[in-house]
Each structure stands twice: as C-alpha cells, then as structure tokens.
Image: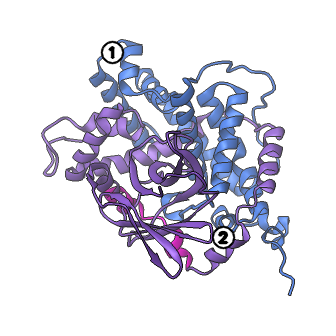
Chain colours: A blue, B purple
C-alpha cells in the first residue's frame, strides 16, 4: 500500500495551526514542512540574536543557518520540560555564535549598521503567540534599561560578546571580582524585575 | 544570597554563579565551580534562577527580519538532506522512542553533569566480541556507565547504558577520527533517558576510521571538540 512521505502527511495550513511543542515530534520524525514552520516562527528572533552577537549580517546568517541545520540533522531532540522551543532554538544559536567566536575571533559590534536589514514592526496579523513574545521582549528590554549601566555592560559583554569575566576585567580595567559582583547584582535585579508583580526593579 | 549557608563552602561563590550562568567563567574555573556546585545547594538554587533570566536575554535584541535568502538556503539544504535514510528509519521504528532519545530532566541532567565533570577516566580496555553476526566493540568510558559500538552490515550503532545525562543545553556528539587527522564531526547527537540508556546510529562510512569518540558539546553540536572525550571506541 502506498504510504505518503512524511513531509506530505500534513498540509501546511494544518501545521501552521500547531503549537511549537506539537510540531517538534514531527520534526524529529523528519517532516521538513513542520521544520519549515518552526523556522518561520523563530528565524527572526534567531537572526536578531546572531546579528546582535556577531555584528555582521553575513556572519549572522551563517550562524543561524548552521544552528537550524544542526537542529534538523540531529533530529531536533527537544524536551518541553527544558523550556519553550524558542528558548531552546535561541540557546543553540547562542552556542553556535560563541563557538564561532572561539574559532575565528569574530566579535560583536562590527558593521552594526549594515544595509539591507529590516527592523520588524508590529504586523497587523500578529498571532497571540507573537503578541506574547513581543511583550516578553519588551519586558526584558525595560528591565535591562533600568539596570545601572555598569551592571548592564558586563552582562551584555558576557552574554552577547562571549567574553569571560577576566577578559571583561581587562577591557574595563577592573578587578575580576568587581566584574563578577556586577554580573551577580545585575542578574539578581533582572530576576526580581521579571518576577515581581509590579515589573519594577528594586 | 549569603555564602555561609549550611551547604555552602566558606569561599565567596555568589559571583561565580552569575558568571557561570552567563558562560563567563574562565575555562580553568569551570570544573572547580562545578565541583563546588555539588556541595552547595544555595548556588544550585541561584543558578536555576539566574538560568531563567539568562534565557530571556536573547529577546532583548532589536528584532530584525531574517533575510529571505537565508530561508531559501536553509530549506534547500533541508530538502536535500532527508534526515532518515530508509535503514535508519527501520531501526528507529523498531525501538520505543523514549529509550532512544529521551533527554534527562534538567535537575537530573545537572546533577549527572557534575558526575561527568569530576569523573576520572575509567580504564576499561577496548576489546571486541561477536554477537548475532555483529562485531561488538567495548568502548572506554569516562565515569560511570558502559558503551558498545555494534558493527553489522557496514552499519555502526553506539549503545550506552547507565551513562550520565549531559547538563541542560548540552548534548553528546559523536566524532570519527582517522589516523592523525583531527576528529570529524558527525550528525549523530544524543542524550540518554533517566536510566542513563541511549543509542545512536553512527552515520557515514567508517572506512579508514581508527576511533569513534564522543564528547559533551553545546546543543546542536560543534564542528570541533570543545570538551574531553567521554567515550572512545577503537576500531583499528
């Protein structure tokens, strides 16, 4: 009896109606169309992160391509107990960029005004998931903005720049303990801001 | 957080937790800090809380639209790389999925990762035997657990038992080493279930391969090993 290939078992409109967590088992089973839906949902966030970290459009594209293809090749072994699909995808992108830094000494902050990039504006056909993600993004941006600049700086250098605390200490001419202390204070305040009922930093 | 908690060491560890969560500890500090985590419940709790915060940081990036050409390139590659070859699909269907690719719970993964971090390389000599027409190579394993490489019909499969799960955000990656060349990455990435069991098909030809090895790497894998070998099966 004819069995359709996996990639044709679901029509695309059906797939686009599925939650991320329900798409991942299909991706695991080799459904390229389900993978395409996952890519479409998270490619902008992935590219935004890679671009922020690498500072170059071409490098950011390479990082995102490598990250998504590694997810595809590895069978996308996502476990929902580890958090959202988006966090998982972005974690892979982050790791790929850090890996690139280690190999090629590529760092953030280069060509950050490269032409050809389009900053996303609020679209009229946002889904509820898009709206939630935008609210989450606005929340963390506001929390970061409220941090003292010295704490925000060391956190951003570490996470987006891939620098170790001792490298940051050298760059900023600070004691390593000072850098670690600022990281801890900053993360503590972010946690309180993100978890607090008022959303305000203490 | 106070560093003087009942399970905390006297050293000042609060700053290390934040730096570790941000991936900013220097390489030589990581192992020592992981050992400290084994005995410091306060740091473990704080790390869990900081980890959630760090997970939100990517969202703070200004949102950019991914170039349309990037989508075309990725999907073209995906369409040209159907992931499951027929033989692999049959193999996969023959096993319950949860024993094949179950990822450990974060807490379990974290605890067992500590075991990996402090493990000494246990000297189980590689040797081989025959079973049902398959050649079985008993691999060297770092830390607890066992690993076997099964060779049959030109196909290789790595099977592990009672093996430590990788920590959150990490996965085991299989590499093929030929002679004096650097290890080549494969698409074989795996984790283990709560019992520490797992198996993975080793893709590609083993022609000229002298060593099949496994390292712990960031999710998605890397192109060069960044961590010590935890499984080593010698073919030559």
Name above or below for residue B63 compared with residue B197. above
Q: Residues within 10 Å of mark 2 (few under 14, many from 20)?
A: some
At x 28%, y 46%, the residue is B34
Which residue corresponds to the image point at 27% horizontal and 24% vertical from the top-left?
Answer: A177
- Extreme residue in the top direction: A173
Q: Is residue B219 above or below residue B181?
A: below
Residue span colored magenta: B96-112
Front-most of A121 and A182?
A: A182
* Total tally of numbered discs in the picture: 2
The answer to whether marks 1 and 2 mark residues whose Cβ atoms lie closer than 8 Å is no
Q: Position of residue A142 (x, y in %)?
A: 54, 34
- Main SS class of the magenta portion in the image: helix
| Dot label at residue A174 | 1
Which chain is indicated by disc 2?
A: B
What's the residue at 80%, 50% (across, down)?
A: B75
Q: Position of residue B63 (x, y in %)?
A: 69, 36
Q: Is residue A196 visible?
A: no
Q: Is residue A147 magenta?
A: no
Question: How far, Cα to Cα, is label 1 from label 2?
Answer: 54 Å
Name the element at disc 1. Answer: loop
Counting from the top left corner in percent of width and height, residue B196 is at: 39, 69
């Amino acid at each position: 009896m004819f069995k359709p290939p996996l990639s044709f078992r679901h029509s695309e409109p059906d797939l686009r109606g599925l939650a991320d967590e329900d798409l991942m088992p299909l991706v695991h089973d080799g459904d390229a169309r389900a993978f395409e839906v996952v890519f479409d949902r998270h490619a902008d966030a992935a590219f935004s992160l890679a671009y922020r970290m690498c500072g170059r459009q071409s490098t950011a594209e390479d990082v995102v391509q490598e990250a998504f293809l590694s997810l595809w090749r590895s069978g996308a072994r996502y476990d929902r107990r580890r958090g959202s699909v988006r966090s998982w995808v972005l974690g892979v992108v982050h790791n790929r960029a850090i890996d690139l830094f280690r190999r090629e000494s590529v760092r953030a902050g280069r060509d950050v005004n490269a032409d050809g990039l389009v900053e996303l504006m609020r679209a009229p056909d946002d889904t509820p998931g898009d709206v939630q993600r935008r609210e989450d993004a606005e929340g963390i941006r506001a929390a970061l903005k409220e941090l003292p600049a010295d704490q925000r700086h060391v956190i951003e250098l570490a996470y987006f720049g891939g620098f170790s605390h001792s490298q940051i200490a050298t760059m900023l001419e600070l004691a390593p303990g000072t850098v670690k202390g600022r990281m801890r204070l900053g993360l503590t305040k972010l946690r309180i801001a993100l978890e607090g009922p008022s959303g305000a930093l203490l | 957080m106070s560093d003087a908690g009942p399970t905390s060491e006297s050293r000042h560890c609060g700053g290390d937790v934040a730096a570790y969560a941000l991936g900013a500890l220097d390489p030589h500090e990581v192992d020592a800090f992981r050992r400290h985590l084994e005995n410091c419940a306060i740091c473990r709790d704080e790390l869990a809380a900081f980890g959630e915060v760090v997970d939100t940081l990517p969202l703070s990036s200004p949102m950019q639209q991914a170039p349309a050409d990037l989508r075309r390139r990725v999907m073209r590659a995906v369409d040209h790389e159907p992931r499951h070859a027929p033989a692999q699909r049959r193999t996969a269907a023959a096993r319950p999925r949860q024993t094949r690719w179950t990822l450990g719970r974060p807490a379990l993964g974290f605890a067992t990762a500590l075991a990996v971090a402090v493990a000494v390389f246990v000297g189980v000599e590689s040797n081989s035997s025959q079973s049902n027409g398959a050649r079985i190579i008993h691999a060297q394993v770092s830390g607890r657990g066992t690993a076997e490489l099964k060779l049959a019909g030109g196909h290789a499969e790595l099977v592990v038992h009672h093996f430590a799960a990788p920590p959150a955000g990490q996965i085991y990656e299989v590499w093929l080493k030929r002679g004096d060349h650097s290890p080549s990455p494969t698409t074989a990435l795996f984790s283990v279930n709560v019992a520490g069991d797992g198996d993975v098909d080793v893709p590609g030809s083993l022609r000229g391969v002298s060593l099949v090895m496994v390292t712990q790497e960031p999710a998605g894998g890397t192109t060069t090993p960044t961590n010590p070998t935890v499984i080593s099966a010698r073919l030559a």
